[in-house]
Image (spheres, rainbow, N blue to C red):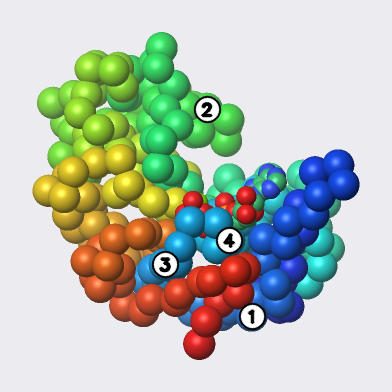
Amino acid sequence: MIRTENLTKVYRMGEVEVQALRDVNLEIQDGEFIAIAGPSGSGKSTLLNMMGCLDKPTSGAIFIDDIDTGMLSENKLAEIRREKIGFIFQQFNLIHTLNALENVALPMFFAGVGRETRLKRAEELLAKVGLEDRVDHKPSELSGGEQQRMAIARALSNDPEIIIGDEPTGNVDTEAGNVIMDILEGLNREGRTIIVVTHDAEIAARAGRTKRMRDGKVLD
Ligand SMILES: Nc1ncnc2c1ncn2[C@@H]1O[C@H](COP(=O)(O)OP(=O)(O)OP(=O)(O)O)[C@@H](O)[C@H]1O
Ligand SMILES: [Mg+2]
């Protein structure tokens, strides 16, 4: 379970302050599929980054499985990110010099998984997202939808309980977006918690629950 308590984020840029999150209280149950919608600048990415322990709030707290993440050391936070959370981004964030197999295997390298195991697992994960015929392809040799599926396979490499996607269908066409949602739904059926930000009402409609944000607040 992920729970935020009076979560506030203020970005300070010299003299200027941007209040990106204002007292956000949100509870996400294990195994939920939740969509977060709302206009540009409403704080969606900021909220995801906090829930994924990629950034720290100005005030308030984030609990993951009842652990107050604000009390954890950097090392412990990195461990949570690595072991519990898989990230998918709008821009895919793949490494262009590596092929699909290597991209997917990379987080396992950092997690200390041996070479044989990680290559075998990377192959299985690519098959899971329908890319078994593309293991040798570099990101530039794949379509946008395929690149995002590669990113999903990579996000799965450490078998995360939680998958966080910031506009995972934002840079692909409707058909590829639906394939990505099919994959995310399958992962949700496996019991994983899925949190996606989307501008697309049709995509949001496929989640179990949608929360809307405006001006740094989560609306009821
Ligand atoms: N690193 C940063 N430094 C300063 N201000 C930031 C930073 N990141 C975001 N902001 C500001 O915080 C507010 C919320 O940004 P955020 O990226 O969370 O919005 P969003 O809802 O994800 O928007 P979009 O739909 O365009 O991605 C915006 O006003 C933005 O300009
Ligand atoms: Mg955003």
Q: Nearer the viewer, residue 209 or 151?
A: 209
As measured in the structure, the alpha-carbon distance from the residue carrying label 3 to the one carrying label 2 is 34 Å
**Which mark is drawn over residue 15?**
none
Q: Residue at x 62, y 68 (%)?
A: 216
Q: Residue at x 86, y 42 (%)?
A: 14
Q: Is residue 147 above or below residue 152?
A: above
User: Which residue position is annotated with label 1?
Assistant: 25
Residue 214 in percent (x, y) is at 54, 71
As measured in the structure, the alpha-carbon distance from the residue carrying label 4 to the one carrying label 2 is 33 Å
Residue that extends furthest to the top in the rendered view of this protein: 97
Secondary structure beneath label 1: strand
Q: Quadrant of residue 84?
A: bottom right
Of the two numbered discs 3 and 2 on the same chain, state the one appearing first in sequence: 3
Of the two numbered discs 4 and 3 on the same chain, state the one appearing first in sequence: 3
User: Which residue position is annotated with label 4?
Assistant: 43
Of the two numbered discs 4 and 1 on the same chain, state the one appearing first in sequence: 1
As measured in the structure, the alpha-carbon distance from the residue carrying label 4 to the one carrying label 3 is 10 Å
Amino acid type, residue under disc 4 in the picture: Gly
User: Which residue position is annotated with label 2?
Assistant: 109
Secondary structure beneath label 3: strand
Q: Nearer the viewer, mark 1 or mark 3?
A: 3
Amino acid type, residue under disc 1 in the picture: Asn
User: Which residue position is annotated with label 3?
Assistant: 37
Residue that extends furthest to the bottom in the rendered view of this protein: 220
Q: For disc 1, does the CB lie below 8 Å from ligand 1? A: no
Residue 149 in percent (x, y) is at 27, 40
Secondary structure beneath label 2: helix
Q: For disc 3, does the CB lie below 8 Å from ligand 1? A: no
Residue 198 in percent (x, y) is at 37, 59
Q: Residue at x 16, y 50 (%)?
A: 174
Q: Nearer the viewer, residue 52 or 167?
A: 167
